[in-house]
Amino acid sequence: MKGLVEVSSAVDLRRLGVGLRDDAVVQFSRPLAEPDYRSLAAFLTDHPTVTLRVYGSDEDLAGLRFLRWFPRLRRFSVAGLYHLADLAPLHQLSPDVEALDVGESRKLLDLTPVAAFRGLRRLRVVAHRRGLADLLAANPGLQGLALWRLAVDRVVPDVVLPRLQSLALTLGSLTAAEWLTRIPSLRYLALRTVRKLTDLAVVTRLPALQWLWLDALPVDRLPDLSSCAALLRVDCTAMRHLRHPAAVRGLAAAPRLQDLMVTESLLPVEAFTPFVGHPTLEHVGVGLDSERRNREAGRLLARTPPRSDTAIAAAYGLLRML
C-alpha cells in the first residue's frame, strides 16, 4: 500500500488511486497545470482522508494561489514550503478542514488566519508561536496535536483541549511537567528531545494513557507506573541517561503492558530482569548498542518482536502523531 505519492503534471489519477492508503499523503513541489489541479481536487474530494502536501522552494506555490482549485479539501500540509510568508490564503479552503500541518518554513508565521477554522481534528505546528494559543482555543475538538521546537508551557500556558487523545512534543522544552495534567484525556503521548523535562512522574497522572513514546530525554530513571492501568505500549528511544540496573524497574510495574521497545540504549541486560515474569507482556524489542547484549536480552526476555506502529495504532484505535 502506498503511503506517500509524489505527483507532477500530467497527473495519472488511475495510477494514483491504485493501492493508495486511506491516510496517505499526496504531494508536489512544482506548480501543476490547471487541468491537473482540477482533476487532483476532484480525486481528493473522493478521498477526503488523504492529505495534500505542498513543499519545496517554488515561490509561486508559496503564494498558495492554487488553493482556489481545492475548495473542498479536508487535509492540507505546507510542511517544508520554505518561502511561505502568509497563511491568509488558507481562507480559500473549506471551513470543514479537519487536519492542518503548518510545518517548517524560513519565516516564522502568524497563525491567526488559521484560527478561522473551528473544526480541526489534527494539527501540527513547527516553531510558529504567534497566534497558537488562540488557534488552540478556537478548536476545542482537537484530537491530535503535534508541536515542534516550542517552549510549550510558555507559549500555551492555559491549554484546554477536552477531547485531545494524542499529543507529540518534539525538539522544544517543557519547564513545568504539570502542564501535561491539563490534558487527562491523553491516550498517546510522545515526548521527543524535550529540554528541561527531567522527571516523568507526571505520566502516572494520565489515567487514559495507552501508548507512551520517550525519545532522548534527560531522564535517568523511569517512575513507578503501577498506577497506569491503561498503559499497553512503551517506546524508549535513545534514552542514554537510563544506565542504572534499576532505571526501568518502574516501567515493569505497568500492570497491562503488552508491547515494549527499547533501542539505542546503554542499559545493562540485567535491567530487564523485572520484565521476565510480567503477566501481560507479549512483544519486546531491545537494542543495547551491542550484538552480544542484544542476544543476551533476547534470551532473557523470550518474547516475540514488537508489532509495527501501524498495527499498534489499529489494534488500540489510537491516533499516532509526529
Image (spheres, rainbow, N blue to C red):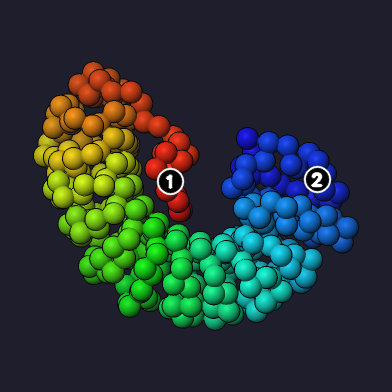
Q: Residue at x 78, y 70 (%)?
A: 68
Label 2 with label 1: CB-CB less than 8 Å: no
19 vs 199: above or below = above
Check disc 1 and give the amino acid type.
Answer: Gly
Where residue 274 appears, as percent x and y from the top left, is 13, 32
Identified at 78% across, 39% down, the residue is 15
Task: Measure the C-alpha gap from mark 2 to mark 1.
Answer: 30 Å
Residue 286, located in which quarter of the rendered image? top left
Placement of 135 over or under 301, stated as above or below: below
- Give residue 40's position: percent from left, percent from top: 78, 54
Quarter of the image that includes the N terminus: top right
Circle 1 residues within 10 Å: few <14, some 14–19, many ≥20: few
Residue 248 seen from this side: no
Q: Position of residue 139 (x, y in %)?
A: 48, 73
* Residue at screen point 25% across, 66% down: 181
- Most distant residue in the left direction: 246
Residue at the spot 22% in from the left edge and 24% down from the top edge: 301
Q: Depth-wise, is mark 2 or mark 1 nearer the camera?
A: 1
Residue 277: x and y, percent? Answer: 15, 27
Q: Of callouts 2 and 1, which one flags the residue occurring earlier in the amino acid sequence?
A: 2
Position of 11 with respect to 176 (left or right) is: right
Q: Nearer the viewer, residue 85 or 179?
A: 179
Vertical arrangement, residue 248 with respect to residue 299, above or below: below
How many residues crowd around disc 2 within 10 Å: few (fewer than 14), some, or many (20 or more)? some
Nearer to the camera, 99 or 153: 99
Q: Circle 2 is placed at which residue position?
A: 13
> Which mark is drawn over residue 125?
none
**Looking at numbered disc 2 in the image, what kind of residue is underneath it?**
Leu
Q: Secondary structure at mark 2?
A: helix
Residue, disc 1: 317
Helix, strand or loop at label 1? It is loop
Which residue occupies the foreground of this view, 16 or 187? 187
